[in-house]
């Protein structure tokens, strides 16, 4: 499938922010302007019927990267060396069940794309400075804050204050607690009655505070463990049910 090769990732932002965070255009236009990392996400936005929303409404988008969609779909007869694609992916499971595989992104029900995209969408414009500190080792002290996404799922969002370290691993190592760089994290809470971070699906932000005209974009690190929608298994089960 041609669109899968388009998902190939180049190095993306890894510094936690951009020298010039402002983008002269909408959130939709920002996605379109970064085809190497986000063109598949842009296509899914359109298939989900959210293009106008991404062009006009003010909101905060924690943007997953295209690689997560590649791994979500997979290939029915994958012969490569990637252990994840060897055993998972919607197409492999659909093929094994004798169901129609996914040839284009439009082969997935639009309501499924919308359901899982909305997990990444939050009301209003919020930058890194607007979120509280989170420390997963002392969560009772620095616990971030829970926020409702557009589909009423809940995520804990907070800023990790890294230590400032010099001469790491050497006898002269020095470490200043919480004095290093700051990195935004989002943890999808699967069960609101059990919000313990150990049972949540956490994902760090690769680049925060990108500011189009109608909100904020925080581009997420590629998440190999949970995948698109913060739970690839759940997405695949929805796709399978829609094709029965």
Image (tube, grey):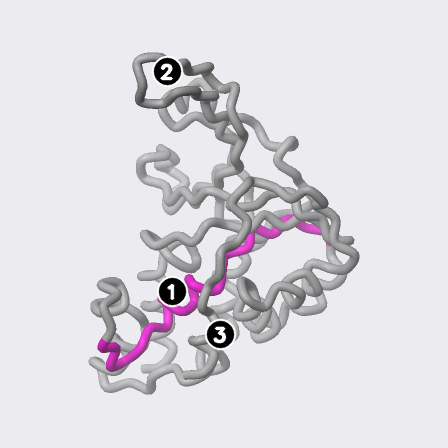
Q: CA distance from mark 3 to mark 2?
A: 44 Å
As helix, strand or loop, the secondary structure at mark 3 comes to helix
As helix, strand or loop, the secondary structure at mark 1 comes to helix
Circle 1 residues within 10 Å: few <14, some 14–19, many ≥20: some
Which of the numbered marks, if any, corresponds to residue 6?
3
| Residue marked by disc 2 | 173
Q: Which segment is the magenta one? A: 58-79
Where is residue 15 drawn, in percent x and y?
55, 41
First along the sequence among labels 1 and 2: 2
Q: Give the left or right position of residue 23, taking residue 129 as reference.
A: right
Residue 18 occupies which quadrant of the picture? top right
In the image, 78 versus 190, the foreground residue is 78
Which of the numbered marks, if any, corresponds to residue 162?
none
In the image, 212 versus 172, the foreground residue is 172
Q: CA distance from mark 1 to mark 3?
A: 21 Å
| Residue marked by disc 1 | 235
First along the sequence among labels 1 and 3: 3
Is 187 contained in the magenta span?
no
Where is residue 137 drawn, in percent x and y?
36, 24
Where is residue 84 drawn, in percent x and y?
26, 63
């Amino acid at each position: 499938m041609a669109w899968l090769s388009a998902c190939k990732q180049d190095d993306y932002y890894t510094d936690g922010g951009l020298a010039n965070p402002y983008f002269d255009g909408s959130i939709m236009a920002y996605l379109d302007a970064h085809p190497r990392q986000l063109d598949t996400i842009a296509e899914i936005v359109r298939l989900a019927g959210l293009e106008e929303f991404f062009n006009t409404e003010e909101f905060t988008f924690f943007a997953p990267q295209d690689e997560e969609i590649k791994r979500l779909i997979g290939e029915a007869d994958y012969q490569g060396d990637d252990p994840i694609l060897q055993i998972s992916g919607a197409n492999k499971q659909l093929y094994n069940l004798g169901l129609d595989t996914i040839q284009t992104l439009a082969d997935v029900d639009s309501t499924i794309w919308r359901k899982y995209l909305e997990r990444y969408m939050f009301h209003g414009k919020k930058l890194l400075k607007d979120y509280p500190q989170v420390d997963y080792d002392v969560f009772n002290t620095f616990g971030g804050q829970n926020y409702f996404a557009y589909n009423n799922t809940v995520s804990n969002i907070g800023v990790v204050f890294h230590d400032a370290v010099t001469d790491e691993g050497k006898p002269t190592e020095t470490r200043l607690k919480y004095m290093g760089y700051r990195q935004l994290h989002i943890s999808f809470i699967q069960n609101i009655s059990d919000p313990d971070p150990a049972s949540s699906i956490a994902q760090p932000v690769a680049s925060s505070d990108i500011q189009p005209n109608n909100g904020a974009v925080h581009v997420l690190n590629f998440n190999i463990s949970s995948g698109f929608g913060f739970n690839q298994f759940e997405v695949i089960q929805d796709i399978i049910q829609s094709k029965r």
